[in-house]
Image: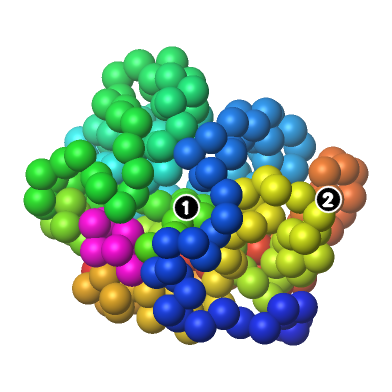
Amino acid sequence: MLTSVLPEPKLDDYSDEGSLAMAVATGFADLDDYYAGSLGRRYLRRVWEAVEPLLRPLGGVEVLDVGCGAGHYSELLAKAGAGVSGIDPDAGLVELARRRVPGGEFQVAGVNALPFADGRFERLLCSNVLEFVRDQGGAMRELRRVCRGEAVVCVLNRASLWGVQQQLFGPFTSHPYYQGRFFTPERLEQVAKLGGWRVVSLREAVRFPPLPVEPLLGWLDGWGPGACWIARLR
């Protein structure tokens, strides 16, 4: 496993309102373009291959896609037979999600204040969201509040090539992706516990480097540490 370039932040850093100096609500407007490219398409496919078995059964199940973005995972959930709801703080991305999944229910909202009743959902998917949330413990508590069943959480791996790239480029860009806090497995378990969750299973996924060149991606797919950690929570 690769060694992190920067020292691991303290757990308290995750609940500091000023710890992420960026406007997440509008900073990921380019997300739809990312998933249209070779790197994004492969990333989406590999994450879905890892999370879909953990979410089963999906037929007729009410699922919340937390941080739904432009609706790429919501679309896959709907195709698997789930009743899909989604939230995202970016109004433009929410509109794209509504177009992508006409039968879904999508709202503009943040993960720390979910506009749903207690225990509304049987399943919950939260992919690449917690890295960019200031109060991560509070976010986990909100996920626990609205979910009466299990959750699957995907977070980027601090000790991967993706994590090293993010730390190296972070000082030179204001894009929120490079200002986020990637995870170690220990960190993920700690934050889950803060929200009242228990980690049932934890695995790495997406074993290729962040290189947007299709021939290289095909050749290197399956190599190196996983770009993300995927946890099943109960």
How many badges with numbers are in the image? 2
Quadrant holding the N terminus: bottom right
Residue in the image at 11% along x and 52% along y = 119
Instruction: From the top left corner, tell me how far across and down residue 100 is, in percent.
Output: 46, 20
Report the disc number at residue 139.
none
Q: Kindly identify the amino acid type of the residue bearing the numbered disc 2.
A: Leu
Instruction: From the top left corner, tell me how far across and down residue 40 is, in percent.
Output: 68, 41
User: Disc 2 marks which residue?
Assistant: 211
User: Disc 1 marks which residue?
Assistant: 129
Q: Earlier in the sequence, mark 1 or mark 2?
A: 1
Residue 137 belongs to the span the image colors magenta? yes
- Depth check, front residue: 62 or 65: 65
Quadrant holding the C terminus: bottom left
**Pair 1/2: label in front:** 1
Q: Kindly identify the amino acid type of the residue bearing the numbered disc 1.
A: Val
Residue in the image at 28% along x and 34% along y = 85
